[in-house]
Image: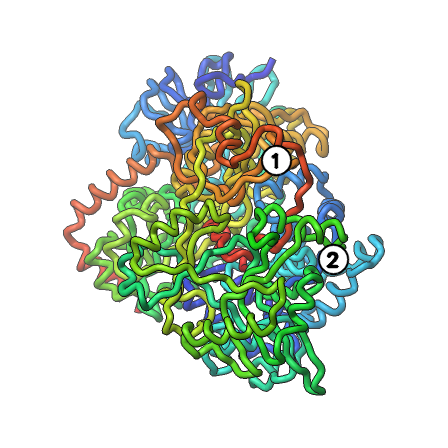
Amino acid sequence: MSLVENTERGLYCRAGDFYIDPWSPVDRAVITHSHSDHLRWGSKKYLTAAANVPVLTARVGPQDVEGLPYGESVVVNGVKVSFYPAGHVLGSAQVRIEYQGDVCVASGDYKVQPDRTCAAFEPVRCRHFITEATFALPIYRWQATPDVMRDVDAWWQANAAEGRTSVICAYSLGKAQRVLAELLQLHGPLLVHGALQRFLPIYREAGVTLPETAHASATSVRAAGGKALVVAPPSVLGGPWLRKFGPVSTAVCSGWMRVRGTRRRRGVDRGFVLSDHADWPGLCEAIAATGAEEVWVTHGYTEPFARYLSEEKKLYAIPIETRFKGEALEETLTETDAATTEDAAAEQQAAAQDTTSREAVAAGAEAAS
Amino acid sequence: MKQFAELFRRLDGTTRTSEKTSLLTDYFRSAPAADAAWALYFLTGRKLKRLIKTRALREWAAEAAALPLWLVERSYEAVGDLGETLAWILPPPEGARDESLVEVVEKQVLPLVDAEPAVQRRLVREAWRLFDDHERLVYHKLITGEFRVGVAQTLVVRALAAAAEVSAPLMAHRLAGDWQPTPEQYQKFISGDLGDDPARPYPFFLAYALDEPVQDLGDPHEWQAEWKWDGIRGQALRRADASGNSVTALWSRGEELVTERFPELHPLLDALPLGTVLDGEILAWRDDRPLPFAALQKRIGRKSITPRVLKEAPVAFLAYDLLEVEGVDFRERPLSERRERLEQIVRQVSQPRLQLSPVVNFQTWDELERQYGRARAQQVEGLMIKRLDAPYGVGRRRGPWWKWKAVPYSIDAVLMYAQAGHGKRAGLYTDYTFGVWDMRRLVPVAKAYSGLTDEEIRRVDAFIRAHTIDKFGPVREVEPRLVFELHFEGIQVSSRHRAGIAVRFPRMHRWRHDKPPAEADSLETLVQLAGMGREDLHPRVSRQSTLFDLDDDVEDPSTAEVRQP
């Protein structure tokens, strides 16, 4: 009997009577991280990594939430629960559950590449590991982040030289902040969409060094004369928001950009392969490091990956159904509808508060020179 | 190779035409002539014959990457491009070495031709050890003959013209026809000092589809109308070479030399006056009228021309333009003058297999519109409308020539199977098989993959993922719930479809949200549209050929960007 079972509401630990990343409201939710496909509003009690508490609150409002520092444990109905960094986004964690000598680790989403904006992934020994499989095909292998950032830098510089605003689209929680933190140098002001702007204070508070930014509006973008780098969620592509900015070059930062067809389909000028998920070697390495004999595979290429682990690595590996009917690759790429709506609301709020954008742009331009 | 791979990567990394052109121009200016010649060869859509079995390539890649073959196949399904899949799964290269493109072609590509599998395997694995993943991608494209870069041929011509500092139409003419990718040849393209190939064709002039009322074209007396034939566009020429010997050639629209495929046209080629170039249509033709396209199809892609085939599907050349007379380029003369000389020449040649494409007479546009209504009955695709005072241009230009295509056939069919697309549509279910009702069962009758908007594609894709009944390799059978109105150009018997019938150039016209599947059309309707009886539906083998892709009417928006005619 497994410590965790897969139910209609998500992963459930019967012994401890709690859910991990439940899809609908429950009495007690243990949360790996604050992306909308893992964190849902409305549960009675939340337990998460301490580093995730401010992010969680920003996403779903004030809740009854308990934050536990990485590596420390708490006992829930006799089950020992602790969190270890997943290296995915700020506050992300793997959940370790121990009960009567059995250990299960639910990874949530994770990556093994270094990331300046969050604690590095830590392998945790266990008998039963629940892994994600977003990029679980051998075609997905990431370049080192500085190599990708060199391409971003060259692209921005070339655009700035031609007076064309650079617009980089990245998931508004995690990827966008990582792009900002990893920029090699500035070629103009950094202007951001409200959807990611609202998380910046939390990142700074957590000790992540981020360059100076201002809110992206028609005024601030045009004032920068094509030199600005605008960071925004992918939902703005093809929408009215971008149209006010004059000539732009667009790019998407995502692991999906590894495949040329996906990139061309997005209709953007550039695709930078930068992901917050583990690539194929990363997944294989992480699973080996757990020493797990049973592996559940969820989110993404679950079937081929489970088959590979069974046949080639001789593990007991099975694909786990997710809430999504069928596969949901495109959704992961474009973000969920919920996230898009949320992004739009955040942008409206930011725009309303944006009374000092001219000053901020001036400060940004100074910083760039 | 690094320079060429970098060019490929950068062309791939931008969607701006101006940027692509300048990247290409820079490459042509800076690359050694021997490399540039090969680059030009590949970029203009010329292919080496298939060098290697892709199945073998997959197996060797699986072995080199220490992955099970099924996982390589699964990855290919997600990527939709074999060369790219293999490039991304292979382990990092062992040593970096930069050889020129010509060295790579000569040492690593051409030796694959007719080599034993063991030798091929050694060569390929050696290349994999040397190349980084971008070079591998280009290498795979070269050896699998699927070199598509998302660059239109006109753009390559424009870029080379800029590098040579000449006009684009002039460069298009220089590049026309068959040539070998040697540095000498490349220098000739740049210098224009060609003048030695008597078989060189002219670039074809192409028409735009009429997208406004025909009445808006102005005075009808300034225009000439002809039937738009449903055959293969061709150029027939006879010239004298340097030593005065006669040279004849028949070129297809894709600038492919097809002289040998149509032996019954040889007497007419031989009968042309020296220094004559005709533009026209190759058609299956008997008793002064065209045979259905299916007849011509039997001639396409067939290496050996048997007496039986010659008897069943004899072809004729229907001339409609004259590009060269007595060795003089005639293209700048107005159509009225070219037509007059053309008629003289056709009369003078007096060969039964050389016909004049007749002029469709009309005094008013309304009169022409009535003729247009008769197009289907005439077994033609519609009308061509050409300005009488216009010269013969290069490529596709708006204004002087219009094609006015007959109203397509239309049926409502049910989505039955789906397969993931390639290139831009990799990983999305975009290639669909549709069926119609036959005795309360659906029988597949058409495959289509164009006509939907990106948004519709996304929605159909989501439907397919959520409503798959069964999987056969990469093909998914879906619940028969979605109905689409399909448009197509013709109907023919086919053994490749279970229904015994196949439609020509099918595409999705619209998604019939309003129609339940039960109300989709039946096989009976198709048979009636075709003017056939059920007894005609006996299976018969028909083979597709690349010549189909060369037809200037295959304007599939999904591939227009990546596949050059």
Residue to which mark 1 is pinned: B474
- Circle 2 packing at 10 Å, graded few (<14), some (14-19), many (20+), is some
- Residue A191 placement (x, y as % from top left): 28, 55
The mark that comes first in sequence, 2 or 1, is: 2
Q: Residue at x 29, y 45 (%)?
A: A201
In the rendered structure, the residue with mark 1 lies on which chain? B
- Residue A296 placement (x, y as % from top left): 59, 26
Q: Residue at x 65, y 62 (%)?
A: B47
- Circle 1 packing at 10 Å, graded few (<14), some (14-19), many (20+), is some
The kind of residue tagged 2 is Leu
Residue B317 vertical placement versus A315 (above, below): below
Q: Quadrant of residue B409?
A: top left
In the image, taking residue B70 as reference, residue A277 lies left or right, namely: left
Quadrant containing the N terminus of chain B in the rendered view: bottom right
Viewer-proximal residue among A352 and A48: A352
The kind of residue tagged 1 is Pro
